[in-house]
Amino acid sequence: MTGYILKRLLSAIPVLLGITVIVFLIMALIPGDPALAILGSYATPENVAKLNRDLGLDAPLVTRYFIWLGNMLQGDFGQSFALNRPVLDEVLERFGATLLLAGVSFVLCAVLGIAAGVVSAARQFGLADKAITFVVLLGISIPSFFLGMMMILIFAVDLRWFPVSGMKMAYGGGGFADVANHLVMPALALSVVATGVVARLSRGAMLEVLRQDYIRTARAKGVSEGRVIWGHALRSAMVSIIPVLGIQAGFVLSGAVYIEMVFQWPGVGRMLVDAILKRDILLVQGGVVFVAACYVLFNIAVDVAQSLLDPRIKT
Amino acid sequence: MSQFLTLLLRNRLAAAGGVVLLIVLALALLTPVLPLANPDATDTANRFQPVLSAGHLLGTDHLGRDQLSRLLWGTRLSLAVGIAAAVFAASIGAAIGIIAGYFGGRTDNLIMRGVDMLMAFPYILLALAIVAALGPGLVNALIAVAAVNVPFFARNIRGVTVGLAHKEFIDAARLAGLGHTRIIFSEILPNVVPVIVIAMSTTIGWMILETAGLSFLGLGSQPPQADLGSMLGEARGALITHPLTSVVPGAMILVIVMGINLLGDGVRDALDPRLRSGALARPMAATRVARRAPVPQNEDAGAVLALQGLETQFHVKDRVYKAVGGVSLQVKPGECLGLIGESGSGKSVTALSVMGLVASPPGVITAGAARYDGADLIGAPYETLRHLRGNRIAYIFQDPQATLHPLYRVGDQLVEAIRSHRPLSKSEAWARAVELLKQVRIPNPESRATSFPHEMSGGMRQRVGIAMAMANNPDVIIADEPTTALDVTVQAQILSLLNELRRERGLAIVFITHDFGVVAQLCDRVAVMYAGRIVEQGPTEAVLAAPAHPYTRRLIACVPELGEGRRKLEAIPGLPPAVDRLDPGCAFAPRCLKAQAVCKQGDIALAEEGARVVRCLFPETDIRLEQSV
Amino acid sequence: MSEVLKLDGLAKSFAVGKRLFGGPRGMVHAVRPVDLVVQQGETLGIVGESGCGKSTLARMLVGLLPATSGRIEINGAPLDNADPSEFGKKIQYVFQDPISSLNPRKTIRQIMDAPLKRLHHIDRATRTQRISEIFASVNLREEFLDRYPHEFSGGQAQRIGIARALAAEAKILILDEPVSALDVSVQAQVLNLLADLKVRLGLTYLFISHDLAVVEAVSDRVAVLYFGSVVEVGPAEQVFAAPRHPYTRLLAQSAPVVGRPLSAPEGRESELPDPLNPPQGCAFKARCPKASEICGREVPPLAPVGGTDHLAACHHPL
């Protein structure tokens, strides 16, 4: 098992390098001169040339890539000109808040989604199945940002159950109760789409598995129906559900960008959007690479979980 | 095509989604000719007008622009962008996927590594990076959304293509003289198109959401031009004071995407061939029973298992397949009954009906009784059935690869079989499981118990299947072609094992097979099935030596036997009948050389004489004569 | 008589367990060097259990798999499938699974058209004519031509597969388990049809099956494959009636036969050798009652036993 984890970690290295190359190349496509954007009205030809030299932008593309990569490996993601602080500090601070929001949403989507899918499949064509199918359809059709806005209107403005926004920091500040209070609505809004996707997929996977011969064998042994569904069938269905959970984690991270905007959540998504609008390239680069790297590591964890579940995967 | 449309329309939800979508599409197309206000004309004096105010059916926004006009223009834009992104992503992705999947090897490796790289990003990061590079704007948002979805299509289509590329019809095409390009266009593409359509119909809604999302963030359409997402983004500032300006575009997105998703599900269901036959229904815990006739009286006292006039049907849409059309048979303790027939003769369905294991839907037991020690099992409460399953009546199935759970250790599967019926502790049950493995002569039972099924050979797996059936010392074992999937040398081992177990324990066995050689070696009596009914039954030796039914005689004759050298075989012309269109009379009559007009009129009863039974008006052997000799 | 098909040291190995760095974990020798000759007009039966390499062998013969070593000669010339439209006229293949060998999205006419158009470049009217002739020769009704494959039963689909192979007008047919997916009553029909066609069209067959009785009933000569090697080859009426290799005898005794009492002809737990870790010497030695010290040391060569046309690869032939 340790060998397998090591192997997967090793195989992640080219992927991580690939990610940096892709991000770097996309950023290199940017038309115009970033120095112009930074200097704005102070842009004289001398100033631009000097800044370009300072930023290392006058070197060839390949050299620039390796300088950037080397700096990143030493923990130097560069300096955000808009915020005037190191990119890594800003990203790390913001990422905690995003991780909290996305993590809670992810757990919600996994637990609720799988449970709904299993119940739906076990009661195929029944009332519960129809109800779940409808709710799920609604869930995957509603834009999460619109859902978040409607939740603010109903639960914050009308009912006053939760605060509209105003989360300052994910940790510290108002303590656990305050954080939890601020978290409920964004986490729910964020998890709805992913829950719907997981539920649909789980239902399909369960229906597929329930038709297999080994389910008939379990029944022929006299195993109780509860164990057939939640044991034999779900275990097999998890083999196709787990990879989707890995993909959904990416979707939850993605959706977090919208939700952070709607709920003014101080996360990395909002930071990125602001940085794009301000053309703060180094911050965008650093943020994207950092989050993508975390996602790659998470997917390794997913693969390991999969190999623990399925002995047929060669470890 | 017409079949596809019928299926789509039969699905009411899909039809509803389609209608909604058609209306929205029509409105979007007609927008330029509708009498609408200029969507970009600001009128700050009249900002935030309510619904149904003069000249503004849906009120005005924060700059006093007409909401209805902006909504329709925005819808038009959102739809156009979403659909364009879907078409781009699907065609580029499909091309990549087909090339990678068809050529395989290094090409595939290289392409898929790149795709994996792109999929290693949470999709929005990539989209954000692209927009950051190209600058905010609707076209750039479209490019970003299409680009991040290309890997999804590529991977999906590649998977399908790999499956197709290894199909035998591709090999056949190659041998028919077709080159790579021709094979891709004439053999692969027609089979991939439905998958592309399904993938598109299920993702197009998602793409509309994504482009709307980028616009919502201010990275898509730029003012004054507005799609639904940027309308929502602009309205967000006034969400609490004037919620209407947010609700209008948001609800429109919801309606569009929901319509697309409903229609997409319908398209998928209609195009997926498995759903066409209604196969994707999950089987219930026990077969449905709907007896249309009174339960027959208990007649046989000596039998441990007796079937009386059992009828099992499959109801698929408006068709009724009479898989089992009134089967009666008995097994006594210690007896082995062979049930022989070709595929579709109903022999397996008969066996599965006993314990309610026929997949339902579509299976329904419509008549008859199955008595274990005199008590009828058909329609018995589920708990009664569950208590007997694997306990008193156990099954051995055909393909041990498919019938053992792939993710549980074989020891655990045996433990479960034991503990479902006996209150043993885990360690006691494990010891018993090892003991069982020893009894079926698996070498090294202690360590083999911790193996997974895929780590064993086919013969070993079937031994586990037999051990599982023996777990609770049952009275009856129903073995459904247990050696058909095995090689002859392994088959010989398994058959002699079964035979020994039966003699040691006085087991009653119902042995289902299509092989007369196996029946001859193992079974005391044999019942021959054709088109859902027993046509002949009797002691094995007598039936094989002097078959009475023409079908039995000719079936035996058309099987080549080892040691007879090269020869012309006696074939039976024609095909077994389809059990959803059975004609009256003898089902074998159309293929029978002795058939006369009377054979096709009305039901033919079983003629019984001593131990032998035959359902024929002109039997090959006079069973009465034979009995008296 | 002439040699239409000649295999000379033909072998195939697959790499398993590809690793990130370095070579594969091991090689599986699916087919070990095989020498065989098929004469004009004969049926050579190839029999063996699952995993013995018989399908791999067949696929190499029609160029669907490249051989690892050795050579194949068709009508005296080495196999050359660089131009598919020439190669298909020499040798054709009939597949095991009749349904999956027909493209589900094409009509039978389109399927039949392909070899006539691509291999023989015949114009449309002549094609229609030819298809009618071929269909008549395999007892299929012409009304089937405008239907799709899923509308046919296994037996009918297999006839269509045979018809397609005939359309190429190749004189050699590789029949890979052509009847094992069919019911016995239909199996006999297809076997008889194949026998008829062979005589009428002067074909040569390589008939692969796991069913000894079927192989015996259709073949002139039979080759027995075990663990990728030919262990015995000889006239069909002798190979099973008087087997010389212990494995052939085991096969013949294992087949269930009416009138023979049930008995396991060998130790109960015998298994195939592990392909990743093949034994030294004779692959059958662990299961063989006659195995001696030399069997563990040397691979026995395929050598004449008794007559010149009966060969067995055994140190201690029966």
Image (cartoon, coloured by chain):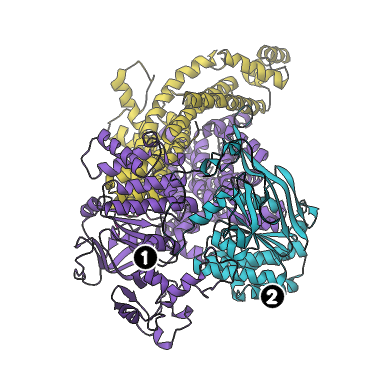
Label 1 is placed on what type of residue? Phe
Label 2 is placed on what type of residue? Glu
Residue range of the region highlighted in magenta in the rendering: B281-287
The chain holding disc 2 is C
State the image quarter where residue B509 is shown.
Answer: bottom left
Chain (cyan):
C
In the foreground, B4 or C58: C58
Is most of the magenta stretch helix, strand or loop? loop
User: Secondary structure beneath disc 1?
Assistant: strand
Chain B colour in the picture: purple
Whether C181 is drawn above or below B572: the answer is: above
Whether B59 is drawn above or below A106: the answer is: below
Left or right: residue A133 compared with residue C67? left
Residue B314's disc is 1
Residue B331's disc is none
Who's the residue at 65% across and 72% down the image?
C196
Residue C290 position, x and y percent, is 54, 44
Residue C133's disc is 2
Is residue A37 inside the magenta stretch? no
**Label pair 2/1, CB-CB below 8 angstroms:** no
Residue A27 position, x and y percent, is 63, 26
Who's the residue at 57% across and 12% down the image?
A74
